[in-house]
Image (cartoon, helix red, strand yellow):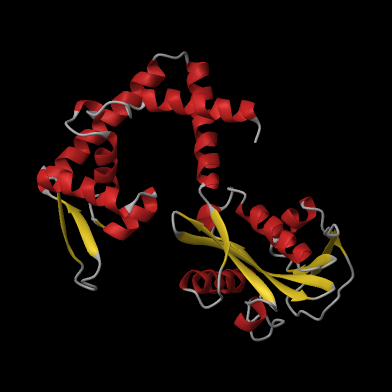
C-alpha cells in the first residue's frame, strides 16, 4: 500500500475524531462518551434487536453489552426478550432515553451548523460535497464479498431478489424455469461458485459462475440491491468472479443479458467484454458477451 495514501488517511482520521468530539468523554456536553450516544441514536424510536445493533455498528458483542448496561443504569434504555423469539434481546428507549435522543439530535445539528458557519459559502459547498463522496467511499469499503452456499439464507435472499427484479423489468416477465439452468448444484464447487456481497451484515448483491474446465466460464445471477447501487459492488463482484474463473483454468468468461438491463450492459462493456454472436439459446437474452482472461502462472 502507498505510504503517502496511508499517511493521508491517518491525518484525515485525526482531524475528524477531533471535530466530531470523539476524543471527549462527554460527547456534545452530555455525561457519556460518543459510543453510548451513537448506540442511543441507533436504537431509535421503535427499538432494535441487540444482534442487529452489533452488526450495523460492527462492534464486539461484549463492548455493546457494556454500552447497553451503562445506558440501562442511566435509565435511558431497557432490554427485554423478543416476544417472537426469546433468544433475541430487544433494546428500547425509555421516555428519558427518547428525550435524550432528541437533545442529541438538536446538539448534533448545532455542531454541524457551527462547523459550516466558519467557512465561506463556496468552501461550505465543497466541504459538504466532499463529505458526501467520503461517506459513499467509506460505505463501499465496508462491503464484504465472499463465497456462499446457494442454500444459505443470504444467498437465497439475493437469488429471490434477482428473479423478482428480472420479472419486473423484462417485457413479459421472467420465469426461471424457461431460462438456462443455474440451480444450486450448478453454483457449488467444483461445478461453479456463488459470491454474496454484504453491507453491515445484510446481503446486497450476488454473482455466480458456472465452470466448464478448460472451456469459457459462464457468468450468472449478477444482481445488486437498489439501495446499494453506486458503491461499485457490481464491478467488485465481476472482478472477483473473473479472478476465480481464471484460477480454475477458464480461458474466458461468457455471459448473456437482456436489453432491459442497460446498467449491466454498460458495466460489461466498460469492464472489457465484447459483444459476440449468440452462443446459447437463452430465451431472455438479446446480447451475448465474452472477455478473454489472462493465463494463470
Q: Where does residue 285 sit, x and y in percent of width and height?
A: 76, 73
Count of numbered marks: 0
Residue 75 lies, with reference to residue 281, above or below; the image says above
Residue at image location 48% in from the left, 17% down from the top = 121
Residue 273 lies, with reference to residue 216, above or below; the image says above
Residue 276 lies, with reference to residue 127, above or below; the image says below
Where, quadrant-wise, is the N terminus in this rendering? top right
| In the image: residue 85, left or right of residue 278 | left
Q: Looking at this view, name the residue that lies furthest to the bottom.
A: 177
- Of the pair 188 and 237, the residue shown nearer to us: 188
Q: Looking at this view, name the residue that lies furthest to the front.
A: 297
Residue at image location 44% in from the left, 14% down from the top = 119
Quadrant in the picture for residue 170: bottom right
- Of the pair 126 and 293, the residue shown nearer to us: 293
Q: Where does residue 182 sit, x and y in percent of width and height?
A: 67, 80
Residue 172 visible:
no
| In the image: residue 139, left or right of residue 18 | right
Where, quadrant-wise, is the C terminus in this rendering? bottom right
Q: Where does residue 240 sit, x and y in percent of width and height?
A: 68, 58
| In the image: residue 296, left or right of residue 171 | right
Residue at image location 62% in from the left, 49% down from the top = 232
- Of the pair 240 and 247, the residue shown nearer to us: 247
Q: Where does residue 206 sit, x and y in percent of width and height?
A: 59, 64
Amino acid at each position: 500500500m502507498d505510504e503517502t495514501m496511508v499517511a493521508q488517511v491517518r491525518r484525515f482520521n485525526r482531524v475528524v475524531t477531533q471535530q466530531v468530539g470523539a476524543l471527549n468523554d462527554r460527547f456534545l456536553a452530555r455525561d457519556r462518551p460518543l459510543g453510548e450516544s451513537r448506540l442511543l441514536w441507533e436504537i431509535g424510536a421503535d427499538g432494535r434487536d441487540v444482534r442487529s445493533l452489533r452488526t450495523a455498528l460492527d462492534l464486539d458483542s461484549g463492548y455493546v453489552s457494556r454500552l447497553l448496561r451503562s445506558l440501562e443504569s442511566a435509565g435511558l434504555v431497557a432490554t427485554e426478550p423478543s416476544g417472537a423469539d426469546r433468544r433475541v434481546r430487544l433494546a428500547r428507549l425509555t421516555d428519558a432515553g427518547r428525550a435524550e435522543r432528541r437533545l442529541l439530535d438538536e446538539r448534533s445539528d448545532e455542531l454541524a451548523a457551527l462547523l459550516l458557519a466558519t467557512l465561506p459559502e463556496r468552501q461550505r459547498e465543497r466541504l459538504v460535497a466532499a463529505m458526501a463522496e467520503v461517506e459513499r467511499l467509506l460505505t463501499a469499503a465496508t462491503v464484504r464479498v465472499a463465497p456462499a452456499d446457494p442454500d444459505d439464507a443470504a444467498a437465497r435472499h439475493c437469488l429471490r431478489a434477482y428473479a423478482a427484479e428480472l420479472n419486473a423489468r423484462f417485457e413479459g416477465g421472467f420465469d426461471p424455469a424457461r431460462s438456462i439452468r443455474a440451480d444450486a448444484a450448478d453454483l457449488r464447487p467444483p461445478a461453479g461458485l456463488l459470491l454474496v456481497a454484504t453491507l453491515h451484515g445484510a446481503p446486497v448483491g450476488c454473482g455466480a459462475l458456472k465452470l466448464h474446465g478448460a472451456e469459457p466460464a459462464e457468468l450468472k445471477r449478477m444482481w445488486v440491491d437498489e439501495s446499494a447501487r453506486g458503491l461499485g459492488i457490481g464491478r467488485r463482484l465481476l472482478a472477483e468472479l473473473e479472478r476465480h474463473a481464471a484460477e480454475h483454468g477458464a480461458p474466458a468468461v461468457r455471459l448473456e443479458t437482456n436489453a432491459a438491463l442497460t446498467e449491466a450492459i454498460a458495466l460489461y462493456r466498460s469492464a472489457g467484454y465484447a459483444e459476440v454472436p449468440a452462443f446459447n439459446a437463452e430465451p431472455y437474452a438479446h446480447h451475448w458477451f465474452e472477455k478473454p482472461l489472462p493465463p494463470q502462472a
